[in-house]
Each structure stands twice: as structure tokens, then as C-alpha cells.
Amino acid sequence: MSKKLVTTYSKSLFQNVNSLQLAKKSGVEVSPVTSIDMKTFLPTVYIIGEELILIRSTLMSSKKLKDFFNNPTYAEQKKLDLLFSIFPGLTVTMKSFLKILKERSHLSLLPEICDEYTSILLKFKNSTQVKLVVATALQESYGTSLLKTLKELTSSKEVILNVSYDPKLLGGLILEYNSTSIDASILREFSLFFNEV
């Protein structure tokens, strides 16, 4: 049930913002309610994504905040007030979205909504987020060829690369994208070798 709600919220937020942008660009008449101040009411899908990422990282970085938002005994209004005090400069669209979540007691879903919204945004931009785990630091000269190869592998125009280091791999790399994992590490080879012996 929670996953379905998260997907619904994320898609409706993205479609709402995107359709308003398209309406403004094409010169379609927008209702007087939404045309009050198009510059503040009509943020791009990217700004909404950035705001969601900021909110998510804030909630996830503090155990107290995370527990506070996940605790159903605290009033949703207090949670909303806290968000507005931490982020006073949120766009009108984000403030409205947070109020809807408050009314439905779903503010605790914000981290998952952010993840789903980011996924939708990446598909919209034809981008792929790739996680690369290596044993040692990558040389700069590998950058161009690595990105070119990853773009071909993922069939994307853009690749967002998250690199992390794990010396336990001994060498090689682990690549993760779109629910696909490629383990080309020496540690894996040793594990396979010892399992056969």
C-alpha cells in the first residue's frame, strides 16, 4: 500500500508541475487561480526535485528527525511547522504538496517520495544513475571513456555517477544501475575460486 501511495504522489507532483510548464510555454490559458504569480507558482520540475532531495537528506541525516517524522503520535501539523521553519524558502508548489501530505498524515513518506520523484525525473531526462564501487581511486584519464561506455551500456543521454571506494574488493569494480549489478571485482573471483575448492 505504501509503495503505491509513494508512486501516486510522485507521479502526480511531477505531472502537475510539468503540465503547468507546458501550458505556460505553449501559451495555453491558465485559470486565474494558477496565474496569480506564475514565477513563484510555476517552479520547474528540477527545482521541485532539488527541494525534495534537501528535505530527504535533512530527515535522513538525523535520527531524532527521522524518528519524529515516523512517529504517528506526533501531530502532523507540528511536523509541517518544523519543515517550514527549516526550509522557509520552499516554492509555493512544494508548500502546497506538503500541506496535502499533512492532511493525509503522510509526511513520513517524504524520503520515499523523493526517491521515486528522482527516478521519474531521471527517466524524463533520459538519465541513468550509476553506482560504481572501486577498490582504489580512479585515474582522471579513465573519465571520458568510462562515461562514454556507461552511456552506451545504459542507453542514456546522461549518466549520474556515484563513485565509492571499498578496499575489500582488492581490485576491479562493482557497477549498479536500473536494478542491474555487475560484479567484476577480484574479491568475487577469489570467492568463486574458494567455493570451487
Image: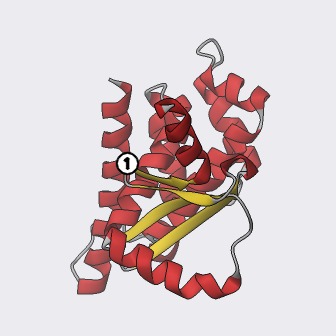
Q: How is the image coloured?
A: secondary structure
x then y, percent, for residue 93: 47, 57
Return the residue nearer the eye: 98 or 114. Answer: 114
Viewport quadrant of the N terminus: top left
Return the residue nearer the eye: 193 or 159. Answer: 193
Query: Which residue appears at 59% of the width and 25% of the height?
Result: 76
Residue indicated by mark 1: 179
Return the residue nearer the eye: 56 or 150. Answer: 150
x then y, percent, for residue 7: 33, 41
Outermost residue on the top side: it is 73
How many numbered badges does the structure rendering display? 1
x then y, percent, for residue 11: 31, 50
Q: Quadrant of residue 74?
A: top right
Q: With 98 as the anchor, is 54 left or right in this view?
A: right
Query: Can you say whether 69 is above or below 155 in the image?
Result: above
Query: Which residue appears at 30% of the width and 41% of the height?
Result: 8
Q: Quadrant of residue 20?
A: bottom left
x then y, percent, for residue 187: 61, 46
> Few, some or many C-alpha atoms within 10 Å of disc 1 (few <14, some 14-19, many ≥20)?
few
Q: With 62 as the anchor, is 181 left or right in this view?
A: left
Give, as a three-letter code, the residue at label 1: Ser
Circle 1: element type: loop
Residue 33 seen in the current view: no
Query: Which residue appears at 37% of the width and 51% of the height?
Result: 180
